[in-house]
Image (cartoon, rainbow, N blue to C red):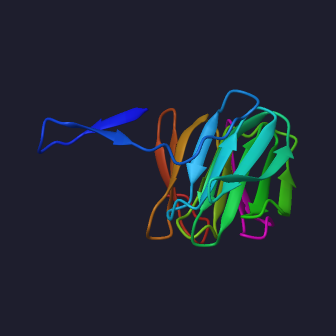
Amino acid sequence: MLRSTSVKQESWKPVKLLAKQPVDEYILSLETDFKGKVAVALTKNTVNIFSDRNLLKKIDIKNGKKIYISSISEIIYVLTSQELYCFDYWGNLEWLYSTEGLIDDFSVDYEGKKIFLQGSNFLIFLSRFGEIEWEYNFDESIISIHPASNDLLLVSTINSIFSLGKDRQLT
């Protein structure tokens, strides 16, 4: 049985385990929506979607890397080495974006409407429907990207920091 302690009192209280779900492989990434009703566990070869503590759907993929849940748009994004999947909360595929280059990472704005794919020295901006809005290549390797609240995208390369605006101008 699990136990917890109170900060105010030095006493132990039993804690009830609400759910336990087995997953076949090591979990690489785990995300929940902000209400805690939907949870997604990503392994190298599967996406496990849980709803209200029960396994809702198990989806086979290859080379899973990262997941992100957009609670506002109720979308689950799953990144593999060359693809970005977009599922609804029930595990239905909304769209799939594939590229020939390796995708290192991705970022999604708070509302889940702007998706940025990051390769070693390229960025791809996708709409919420998985359509390419624009692409940008850098001379140096990209270290990280960060969508800012003022519709700017901050990009850190090995030697510089750039900001990309709505007009796709680099500053």
> Image point 11% across, 45% down: which residue?
8
> Image point 80% across, 39% down: which residue?
46
> In x, y percent, where is residue 114?
63, 66
The picture quadrant where one finds residue 74 is: bottom right
Residue 107 on the magenta segment:
no
The picture quadrant where one finds residue 112 is: bottom right
Q: Nearer the viewer, residue 12 or 25?
A: 12
Q: Nearer the viewer, residue 161 or 49?
A: 49
Is 42 placed above or below 36 here? above
Residue 124, visible in the rendered structure: no
> In x, y percent, where is residue 120?
68, 35
> Image point 58% across, 64% down: which residue?
169
> In x, y percent, where is residue 168?
62, 65
> Image point 43% across, 32% down: which residue?
1
Is 72 placed above or below 103 here? below
Report how many numbered discs are placed on residues in the image.
Answer: 0
Q: Nearer the viewer, residue 12 or 30?
A: 12
Residue lying at the far top of the rendered structure: 26
Residue 161, visible in the rendered structure: yes
Q: Which residues are magenta?
A: 120-135
Is 111 placed above or below 102 here? below
